[in-house]
Amino acid sequence: MPTERDAVMRNSGASTTYDPQAFPPFAVTVDVVVMLVRDEQLQVLLVQRGSEPSEFEGMWALPGGFKRPAETLGEAAQRELAEETGIVLPPGALRQVGAYGDPGRDPRMDVVSVGYLAAVPELGDVTAGTDAVEAQLWPASPATRPKLAFDHGKILDDVLELVRSEAERGPLPTEFLPRTFTLTELRQVYDAIWQAKLDPGNFHRQFTSDPGGWLIETRHLAPPLSGRGRPAMSYRRSARWKTGAPISRPRQKPSSRSTTG
Amino acid sequence: MPTERDAVMRNSGASTTYDPQAFPPFAVTVDVVVMLVRDEQLQVLLVQRGSEPSEFEGMWALPGGFKRPAETLGEAAQRELAEETGIVLPPGALRQVGAYGDPGRDPRMDVVSVGYLAAVPELGDVTAGTDAVEAQLWPASPATRPKLAFDHGKILDDVLELVRSEAERGPLPTEFLPRTFTLTELRQVYDAIWQAKLDPGNFHRQFTSDPGGWLIETRHLAPPLSGRGRPAMSYRRSARWKTGAPISRPRQKPSSRSTTG
DNA sequence: ACAATAGTGTCTATGAGACATTATTGC
DNA sequence: GCAATAATGTCTCATAGACACTATTGT
């Protein structure tokens, strides 16, 4: 919190001009990670930058922009996302990831950015904003995505870890699905998040073991995605599902490692 | 991230003056939650504010202050804590909690604050800073702590949830202890965090079940705290302990509730 | 019938938790 | 010996996981 003793310098640190109302001015921005599951993997919406900071001209980046004084950080994230990509999120769809304020992260100015995550079932029309040359989905994995401008690669890495971790302790994975969904669809979300192939039978039993605890059974059957096969029961997320999950991250991927020395 | 289209208003929103370099200026501050375990409960270091914002005159608050452009958010937190309380933290002792930027959270200016947590074994000399009237420990629980200035109550609530959650998935509890410690001391930390009374025998077995996995056995015995009883083996945290924990939060406290409908 | 998907049953191994028992110290 | 604390042993119950089997659809 501001204290007069520290309210000193307009020019980083060295100045000794004392002014109780002065403080080092920062730009505060929000960056939004819009994530979804497609082709069995997590994908993220990126925008291609215009020519603005020459260091990052034409590079891909997270959509985002300046916070305004009269809005909350979350409201800023929602507004900026809509302005830059045309995507309108339902309230509560955003969760904060963290704040990023390393010196020099933006060569143009002193800026602190707050990252947000929006897990969505799918994207409607994506209309690239005025300054964004283009907006499209990319695989979220560091191995398959382009190099990102600013420190957005770090933000996205943090988001990936957050998603994988949250999947073990909350209903975040259901946010990747529409209001009602089948257990197979939900399992595919977990598979994408953890890059796993969870057992369908065990998965079904785990999520239905506490009726009403994790999921609510709708009385409606959903046809199988491939056209063939038995129709599946449709579920929606339970309001009681705040913390905990009936499932945990598999210990290791299909590579045989026993590094328990 | 800043984009010229959004770099408009100096007066929240309505202005249409276009200036590619302008942005709404914010103060960026850091607030530090210094937490420790004492008297079987989590306690937090608070400072009593001077007369600065009259709304919060004499109230208790988290130590903190302005970020400078040339330092990271974490460095700012470390520096501000030292300036206001005299506490010097080892590197890596701080972890970010979140960013807080609701309009009006500080009546004096537009400010976005980033919260940090430092879990420490104990406090050295606490010397109240120039603007802080006093600095002392308070119980961290909402029921027993004073009402805090600004939105610091919300920040502290978030920290408490973070601590309780992190205890289930990482070595954070060991940060409340010195470099070496006994299993009884570690168990008492978990007890304080979760307000539980974990079984000593089971606790011991869980943390020693994977030798070198969670803890490293030093070859040194520590005398019992009360003077009597068998001396305990001393341990230090394993470098391998990054994620996961051999223990999980007890389902419910000693009140008989079976609300699993 | 057959393929494909949904859902259930069964068995096993692991681990948490309750609780008793042994070990090591000071008085 | 006795009190106090540390550490281990034992038992039970719940559950994750592997995997077989049944159920329901379309072709």
Image (tube, coloured by chain):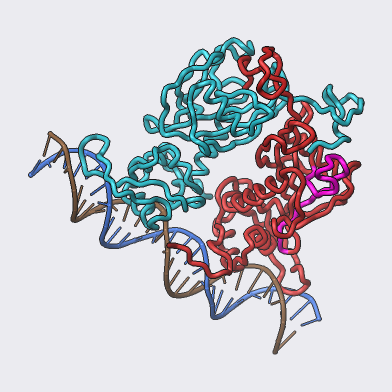
Chain colours: A red, B cyan, C brown, D blue
Rendered image quadrant of residue B19? top right
Position of A229 with respect to B38 (left or right) is: right
Rendered image quadrant of residue A16? top right
Position of A164 with respect to B41 (left or right) is: right
Instruction: Pinpoint residue A210: horizontal percent, then vertical percent.
Output: 55, 56
Inspect the magenta stretch and tell me whether residue A104 lies in it. Answer: no
Visible residue check, residue B254: no
Instruction: Pinpoint residue A175: horizontal percent, then vertical percent.
Output: 70, 50
The residue segment tinted magenta is A40-63
Quadrant location, the N terminus of chain B: top right
Instruction: Pinpoint residue A146: horizontal percent, then vertical percent.
Output: 77, 55
Q: Nearer the viewer, residue B144 or B1?
A: B1
Inspect the magenta stretch and tell me whether residue A51 lies in it. Answer: yes
Position of B206 with respect to C24 (left or right) is: right
Q: Nearer the viewer, residue A226 or B36?
A: B36
Position of A161 with respect to A120 (left or right) is: left
Please name the residue shown 39% across and 30% down the image: B38
Rendered image quadrant of residue B5? top right
Please name the residue shown 51% across and 39% down the image: B163
Compared with A95, A44 (above or below) is below
Compared with B37, A141 (above or below) is below
Compared with C1, C19 (above or below) is above
Visible residue check, residue A135: yes
Instruction: Pinpoint residue B127: horizontal percent, then vertical percent.
Output: 46, 18
